[in-house]
Image (cartoon, rainbow, N blue to C red):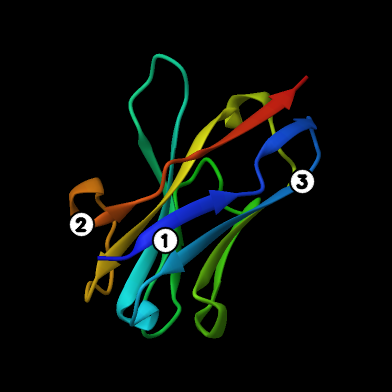
Amino acid sequence: QVQLVESGGGLVQAGGSLRLSCAASGRNFNRYSMGWFRQAPGKEREFVGRISRNTGSTYYVDSVKGRFTISRDNAKNTAYLQMNSLKPEDTAVYFCAAAYLTMFPDNRSDYDSWGQGTQVTVSS
């Protein structure tokens, strides 16, 4: 397993941008597809999107499509979530997760390792 640490969260006004980072320790980062999830107060953790381990193909849920971009830098063992045009409903704790040797992990159960999360608050 890899250990994951998120950073980059904070308070931003609606319409603003943030970039979250997910630093992975351990070996073979390129064998992991990386996903992002979020959990708002009183709600279940929801899938935001992911980037595949080999092809770098991405997938996003409809609510963030066109506003959020997931990328990765295998040389730095880091995945990113660029969030633009933020809305108050994007307010949540954001988690990154890693899925070992899985090409298209689109479900929470596909992921082996989780970070502790970083808070994103979007004010109106």
The amino acid beneath tag 1 is Arg
Q: Which mark is residue 50?
A: 1
Nearer to us in this view, 1 or 87? 1
Quarter of the image for residue 104 reads bottom left
**Is 2 left or right of 38, judged from the image as shown?**
left
Q: Secondary structure at mark 2?
A: helix
Instruction: Give me the residue at 48% from left, 53% from top.
Output: 5
The amino acid beneath tag 2 is Asp
Task: Give the alpha-carbon distance from disc 1 to disc 2, as whole Å.
Answer: 11 Å
5, above or below 34, in the image = above
The spot of residue 88 in percent (x, y) is 67, 24
Quarter of the image for residue 76 reads bottom right
Instruction: Give me the residue at 60% from left, 27% from top.
Output: 91
Q: Which mark is residue 16?
A: none
Task: Give the alpha-carbon distance from disc 3 to disc 2, as whole Å.
Answer: 29 Å
Q: Residue furthest top?
A: 42
Instruction: Give me the residue at 34% from left, 80% from top.
Output: 27
Local crowd at mark 1 within 10 Å, few (<14), some, or many (≥20)?
many
Quarter of the image for residue 123 reads top right
Question: Which residue bears the numbered disc 2?
Answer: 110
Question: Which residue bears the numbered disc 3?
Answer: 17
